[in-house]
Structure formats: structure tokens, C-alpha cells
Image: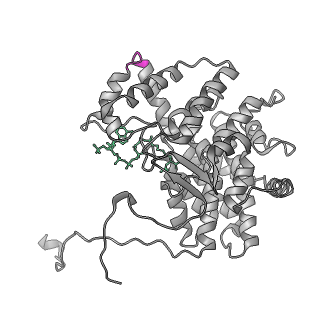
């Protein structure tokens, strides 16, 4: 409708929506879900409680939480034909690509996830995906490692059952380890939402065309995979491993990160919104020490990470650009200590972010947001008449 169009690459200064779900203060390093601080939620709540809070806006009563979990368990199975899709992937396939495909494929077996025009249909699609997604996550990992696929046990808690589906060996009973349960619960809470980040914006804009919830989530998984976003947690470990192989020479990697000619960036550092410490990184750094010592795991990578962090925080280039460790810098160290393979780190990020994506998608649909369709400034050729191929 005419008017001035301003271009804002990466939408650094463009707001896409109003939202009542998550509050960030980048200067002060504040993160709150529906007004509750991430510090208190990580300490006092569990992941399913936080999922309920994000999606429905209130902390659940015990009865509401029990009902939510039992509704989710009713859908904690996937059509066996999903295994045929899984079988088609080579073992070398990256788990994020497998997970995006399987999540999208769920629509074929659950068409109700497409039209969610009533609260009831919306609720049914939500408990379906919360029931099925952890199975896809576990099966993606087990397939890659040649392990049988199972459903764990419906008598377990939500996070306990994820661990059992991921780690149970066919020849032994699975012993629940409270250290692992608490660590995973806390990590999933810390990843659960983060307002209009790249993958959440992808989920919103995909859903704005009224595409179904599952395919919108599949689009979000694809966006999260990128090393500038959720893929950074895997890239951090690969970088720390490289530094270790290189004799622990962090100065060389700091120099590379500052060299404009070199595309290398210090993975796990910097953030579009946080110009101070990422509050999640603070919590995860403490948890990394605790979890590794509780598990009796000595990991030289943790010392390299701490050395690199110290160096970066004292480096003028990084100080000038307000580059601090972000959520991805220490999370991989805990996942590794828990026995989760490196190529699964970003899948764990997606598992945590699932309730956030769902809550943002639901808010967008409930508010009847218009279809996302940005404008552009055209800088191409002016009109020119067609030229026959014989004259080109
Ligand atoms: C996540 O948005 C979210 O909320 C995301 C997330 C969530 O919960 O959803 O928090 C999860 O994605 C965390 C970020 C994970 N990514 C990484 O760790 C990859 C490394 N980080 C960067 O690529 C970067 O910091 C971003 C992508 C995170 C942010 O990029 P911006 O906001 O577009 O900033 P920029 O690229 O314009 O950088 C500003 C300056 C540049 O230097 P100058 O051109 O001004 O001289 O800082 C430099 C950049 O070169 N810079 C870095 C750097 N990050 C920025 N230099 C070296 N190493 C880095 N990591």
C-alpha cells in the first residue's frame, strides 16, 4: 500500500509480533518465561511444568500437570511405518535432518495436526507432538548406533522416559540415574523458549500460512540446525576438540576469530540480544562442573573451555563487541559428560525448544496473525524486451 520501505537485514531492529510468552533484557542478562525467572524455574520446576507454563500461560496445579502428562502419554506412540522412513536414512545422516523429516512425516499419520481452529483441536495436536517427539529423538539416536527402538516405560516421568528410550541397552535393565535426570531436566528448561530467535520466527512464519503444527515445527528444526544458531553447541565441541588436538593453543583460535579474512568465529560466543552474559550460560557453566564431578567425569575439554572464556572476556576485540559466552558454549560439555554423542547435541536443543515453539505457534494462531510476507527494495534490471536465443 505504498509508504516507505526500510530494509533491516536479519531483522536486527524489526519487531515481528507482540508476545506475552518470554521476556529478555539483553543489557541486564534477564530471561523470564511468563514472568517467572529462568533461575527459579531451572531450580524449582520440572520440564513438563515449564512446558505447560509456556504453552498455557500459568504454572499448573498438580491435577492439571497430572492430566497434561497422562494426555501426553496417551499419544506416546508413533505409527510403525515411521520406522520405514528411518530405515531409509544412511547411518551417516545428521540426526537433525532425520528429525526434521520424521517430524514432518508425522502429519501423514496424524492429519488432525493441520486444522487447529478450536482450542480442543489445538490441545490434541499439542499433546500429540509432546508425546511423539521424544520418541523420534530417541529413535534417531538409537538407529544411528544400531540399537533396537522401543518406547521405554509409561510409568516413568517425562524426562526419565526420554533417558530410558535413549540409553537402555537390550541386554540390561536401565538404572535411572538422578544426576542425569536432573541435568537433562535443567538443560531442557534452559532451552525451552527464547522469544523471536531464528527458529521460532521460522515456526511462526510457517504457521502463519495455516500450515499444520508438525510441519511448522519441522521448519523450526531445520532453521535451528545452522551453526550460527542451535548447531553452535555441536560446533563448540568440535572447536574445543580442535584446540585440544592443537596442544590447547587458545591464542591461535582467538586470532582466527578476530581475523576479518578468516570466516572462523568463536563458536558459543556472541548473541543478537544479550550484550552481557547469557543468563543460561551462567547456570550451565555451574552445572557443568557439578554434573561432571557428580558423574566422576574428568574432561580436559572443560578446562580448555574455561581458559578460552577467560581469554575472550579479557580481549579488547571481544569486549568492544560485547561478545560473551551464550547458551551453546557449555551445554555440549554436559551432554558429552552424560554420554550423549556430539552429533545429537542440537537435537537435544530442539527437544528443549519444542514447548517454546509450540507456545509461540499457538499464540500466533490464537491471535489470528496475518500471513508473514515481508517487502523488498528491488535493485535488479529495469524493463528489457525478450531476446531470441539466436540473438543472445
Ligand atoms: C543461539 O537469537 C537467539 O535467541 C538464539 C539462541 C536461542 O536460544 O534461540 O540464543 C540460541 O543461537 C545462540 C547463538 C549460537 N551461535 C553461536 O555461538 C555462533 C557464533 N556467534 C555468532 O555467529 C554471532 O554472535 C551470532 C550469530 C550469535 C549473532 O550474530 P549478530 O547479532 O548478527 O552479530 P554480528 O554477526 O553482526 O557480529 C557483530 C560483530 C561482528 O564484528 P564487526 O563486523 O562489527 O567488526 O561481532 C563479531 C562480528 O564479526 N562477532 C564475532 C562473533 N560473534 C560476533 N566475532 C568472533 N566470534 C564470534 N562468535
Q: Nearer the viewer, residue 221 or 228?
A: 228
Residue at x 29%, y 76% (from the top left corner): 4
Indicate whether 10 appears above or below 331: below
Tell me, yes or no, if residue 165 can be seen here: yes
Within the magenta stretch, is there residue 123? no
Number of marks in picture? 0
Q: Position of residue 277 (x, y in %)?
A: 48, 39
Q: Nearer the viewer, residue 204 or 165?
A: 204
Q: Residue furthest left?
A: 391
Residue at x 62%, y 46% (from the top left corner): 38
Q: Residue furthest front?
A: 28
**Quarter of the rendering occupied by the N terminus:** bottom left
Please give the range of residues in magenta. 245-249
**Quarter of the rendering occupied by the C terminus:** bottom left
Name the dominant secondary structure of the magenta segment: loop
Seen in the image, is 254 located left or right of residue 378?
right
Indicate whether 197 appears above or below 237: below
Residue 67 sits in quarter: bottom right
Seen in the image, is 18 located left or right of residue 320?
right
Residue 358 sits in quarter: bottom right
View quadrant of ligand 1:
top left
Residue at x 41%, y 41% (from the top left corner): 270
Seen in the image, is 191 located left or right of residue 156?
left
Q: Nearer the viewer, residue 242 or 32?
A: 32
Q: Position of residue 350 (x, y in %)?
A: 60, 48
Amino acid at each position: 500500500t505504498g509508504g516507505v520501505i526500510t530494509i533491516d537485514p536479519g531483522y536486527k531492529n524489526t519487531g515481528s509480533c507482540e508476545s506475552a510468552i518470554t521476556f529478555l533484557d539483553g543489557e541486564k542478562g534477564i530471561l523470564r518465561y511468563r514472568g517467572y525467572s529462568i533461575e527459579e524455574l531451572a531450580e524449582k520446576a520440572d520440564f513438563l511444568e515449564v512446558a505447560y507454563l509456556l504453552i498455557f500461560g500459568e504454572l499448573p496445579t498438580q491435577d492439571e500437570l497430572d492430566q497434561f502428562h497422562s494426555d501426553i502419554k496417551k499419544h506416546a506412540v508413533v505409527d510403525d511405518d515411521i520406522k520405514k522412513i528411518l530405515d531409509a536414512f544412511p547411518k551417516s545422516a545428521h540426526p537433525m535432518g532425520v528429525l526434521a523429516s520424521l517430524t514432518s512425516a508425522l502429519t501423514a499419520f496424524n492429519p488432525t495436526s493441520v486444522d487447529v481452529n478450536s482450542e480442543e483441536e489445538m490441545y490434541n495436536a499439542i499433546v500429540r507432538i509432546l508425546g511423539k517427539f521424544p520418541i523420534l529423538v530417541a529413535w534417531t539416536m538409537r538407529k544411528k548406533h544400531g540399537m533396537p527402538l522401543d518406547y521405554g516405560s509409561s510409568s516413568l516421568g517425562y524426562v526419565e522416559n526420554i533417558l530410558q528410550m535413549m540409553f537402555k541397552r537390550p541386554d540390561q535393565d536401565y538404572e535411572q540415574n538422578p544426576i542425569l535426570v536432573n541435568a537433562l531436566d535443567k538443560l531442557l528448561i534452559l532451552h525451552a523458549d527464547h522469544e523471536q530467535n531464528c527458529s521460532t520466527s521460522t515456526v511462526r512464519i510457517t504457521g502463519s500460512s495455516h500450515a499444520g503444527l508438525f510441519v511448522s515445527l519441522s521448519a523450526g528444526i531445520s532453521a535451528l540446525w545452522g551453526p550460527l544458531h542451535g548447531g553452535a553447541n555441536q560446533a563448540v565441541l568440535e572447536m574445543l576438540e580442535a584446540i585440544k588436538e592443537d596442544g590447547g593453543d587458545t591464542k591461535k583460535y582467538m586470532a582466527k576469530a578476530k581475523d576479518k579474512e578468516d570466516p572462523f568465529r568463536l563458536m558459543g560466543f556472541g548473541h543478537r540480544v544479550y550484550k552481557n552474559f547469557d543468563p543460561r550460560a551462567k547456570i550451565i557453566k555451574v552445572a557443568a562442573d557439578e554434573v561432571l564431578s557428580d558423574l566422576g567425569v574428568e574432561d580436559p575439554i572443560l578446562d580448555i573451555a574455561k581458559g578460552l572464556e577467560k581469554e575472550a572476556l579479557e580481549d579488547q576485540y571481544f569486549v568492544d563487541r560485547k561478545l560473551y559466552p551464550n547458551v551453546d558454549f557449555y551445554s555440549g560439555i554436559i551432554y558429552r559428560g552424560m554420554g550423549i554423542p556430539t552429533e545429537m547435541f542440537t537435537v537435544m536443543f530442539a527437544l528443549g525448544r519444542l514447548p517454546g515453539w509450540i507456545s509461540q505457534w499457538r499464540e500466533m494462531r490464537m491471535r489470528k496473525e496475518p500471513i508473514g510476507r515481508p517487502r523488498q527494495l528491488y535493485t535488479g534490471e529495469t524493463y528489457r524486451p525478450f531476446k531470441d536465443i539466436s540473438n543472445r
